[in-house]
Image (tube, rainbow, N blue to C red):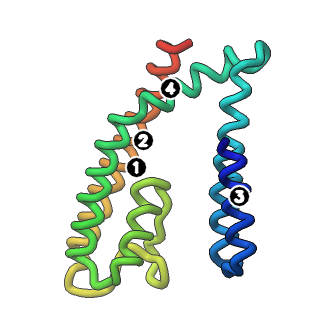
Amino acid sequence: WTRMVLSSGFCVMHGRGYPVTLQRPALAGVVIIQWFQMLFMCRAFALLGPKLLPIMNTLKAMGPFLIVLFFYVGAFLHAYWALSSRPVGEVLTIGYRLGIMGDFALDPGEGSILEDGPMDTWLSTWFFTCTALLTLFMMNVVIGVLGESYDVEH
């Protein structure tokens, strides 16, 4: 049913002359869904199923961790926005890079977390607190949660 509905939707979009800028993101979403469905169907095979099930069930156990992580990242993003003179889009990008990916730039210039100005000391304090709590502590917690959940499922 999913394929029929999605195929019909693309035919309607193409027939009505929707711009490619709308069709390509829709296609990207459909492709992702199709790959996930194909992975889900692989559970039925004896060669892959027993190895995939613990991993899939482990990812379901991540819900509570992701909720806590969402609030921690939100708190640090809000604090950074209050201390920084940057627009919201840059704050969100820097927060994602630091809080989720653990990637940052301290050198002055584009994409740098720190700024030259009266709030530089506060931003440095914010940076070291954020890296300690989010990048080090929370990512080690996720490793523990995933490991314990995988052991239970396996």
Mark 1 nearby-residue class (10 Å; few <14, some 14–19, many ≥20) = some
The earlier-in-sequence mark between 4 and 2 is: 4
Q: Which residue is mark 4?
A: 58
Classify residue 66 as left or right of residue 44. Answer: left
Q: Quadrant location of residue 20?
A: bottom right
Foreground disc of the pair 3, 4: 3
What element does badge 4 sit on?
helix
Classify residue 91 as left or right of residue 18. Answer: left
Classify residue 67 as left or right of residue 93. Answer: left
Would you say the residues marked 1 and 2 are in contact, meaning their CB atoms lie under 8 Å apart?
yes
Q: CA distance from mark 4 to mark 1?
A: 21 Å
The earlier-in-sequence mark between 3 and 1 is: 3
Q: Which mark is residue 92?
A: none
Would you say the residues marked 3 and 2 are in contact, meaning their CB atoms lie under 8 Å apart?
no
Given the image, on which type of amino acid does mark 3 rest?
A: Ser
Given the image, on which type of amino acid does mark 2 rest?
A: Met
Q: Which residue is found at the position 31% from the left and 63% from the top? A: 127
Q: Which mark is residue 139?
A: 2
Q: Which residue is mark 1?
A: 135
Q: CA distance from mark 4 to mark 2?
A: 16 Å
Q: Which residue is mark 3?
A: 8
